[in-house]
Amino acid sequence: MNIQQNISLKNYNTFGIDVLAKHFVSAQSVDELQEVLKLTDYSDKFILGGGSNMLLTKDIDALVVHIDIKGKDIVKQDANHIEVQCMAGENWHEFVLWCIDHDLGGLENMSLIPGNVGTAPIQNIGAYGVELKDTFVSCDAIEVSTGKIKTFTKEDCGFDYRNSVFKNELKGKHIIISVNFKLTTSNHKIKTSYGAIKTELAENGIVNPSIKEVSDAVIAIRQSKLPDPKELGNSGSFFKNPIVSKEEFDAFYKSNPNAPHYIVSDTEVKIPAGWLIEQAGFKGKRFGDAGVHKNQALVLVNYDNASGTEIWELAVQIQKTVKEQFGILIEPEVNVI
């Protein structure tokens, strides 16, 4: 166990925010993580996964515990399905590609989402009509206060749109160490109706796509719209797409008849936050080193050396303007720390 002092977290968060961890340790096994949690000299511990869903606005005056536990295992298999356990420190996109290489279906629509597997259940990540909960079986997590391992079922996790118990009543109380997925080995359920997937496939002359072709289409779409965090600091979608009541939407739609929208249920409608931000005039705008991406207004970016505070101030300005113009509150998807 190597505990370091005053370590920059610039390379540990996808925004590339340069803040310091007063103390830092990387846990590369479950046993090592349990030992770290027992350390009484560091009462405050800050758990860090892939750093993709956070905006750091200050130095971390605590022991930052980087979850770097790797590995993948087949738990069980039947005629059409397989259950795979993936450890928390695995990169999400690399895991999706591994599944596709092994002809395992279910995650292809979520290709190229930044972050690690362990943090994926926390906000129930999703893209192009598919969410993590659709293939989720269970996850194992260590209780911070006791070091004991507990298994959470799908029902235990209380998944909702970009939400789970780990963002609410269990926030900070457990550390996810592995996630189990139920994936298809045959008769894959191809989903191409959401977003631009069908158009991308058609442009490539693909009528009956494989899971790899769906993944390739998603990757192409995301790369055309979203910046690579390795080249331009960002955290993917900064805001959630707001879900409003049918009554709220009807009032909104009278003034905005060209607004894209998606029916969630008989009583709710989802409106793309990126469209609202673009209509409010922020797309492509730069404020010092903080800005809104030129191809996707939902993505806030760090052009060079923006502080987390500067990016957060821009986010608040966007929220305020969208609320004033459309009467709709857009909420952050990232954790602001």
Image (cartoon, grey):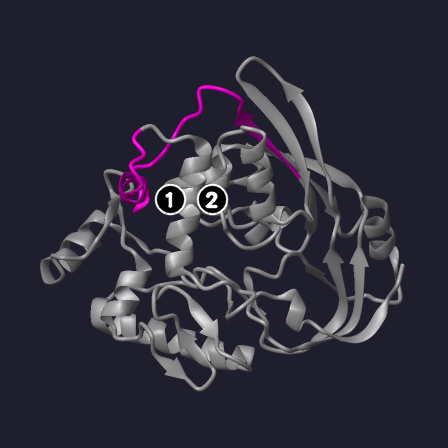
Give the crowd class for mark 2: few <14, some 14-19, many >=20 residues within 10 Å. many
Q: Which residues are magenta?
A: 179-207
Alpha-carbon span between mark 2 and mark 1: 7 Å
- The residue that mark 1 highlights is 128
Location of the C terminus by quadrant is bottom right
* Figure check: 99 above or below 227: above
> In percent of the image, x 53 and y 17: which residue is there?
80
Residue 296 rendering spot, x and y as whole percentages: 35, 64
288 displayed left or right of 150: left
Which quadrant would residue 45 be assigned to in this image? bottom right
Relative image position of residue 211 (x, y in whole percent) = 45, 32
- Is residue 320 visible in the rendered structure shown here? yes
Is 237 in front, or is 330? Answer: 237
Q: Residue at x 69, y 25 (%)?
A: 75
Asked if labels 1 and 2 touch by Cβ distance under 8 angstroms, the answer is yes
Residue on which disc 2 sits: 110
Q: Secondary structure at mark 1?
A: loop
First in sequence: mark 2 or mark 1?
A: 2
Residue shown at 33% from the left, 43% from the top: 197
The quarter in which the N terminus is drawn is: bottom right
Give the image location of residue 315, x and y in percent. 41, 73
Q: Position of residue 23 (x, y in %)?
A: 80, 71
Report which quarter residue 171 is drawn in. Answer: bottom right
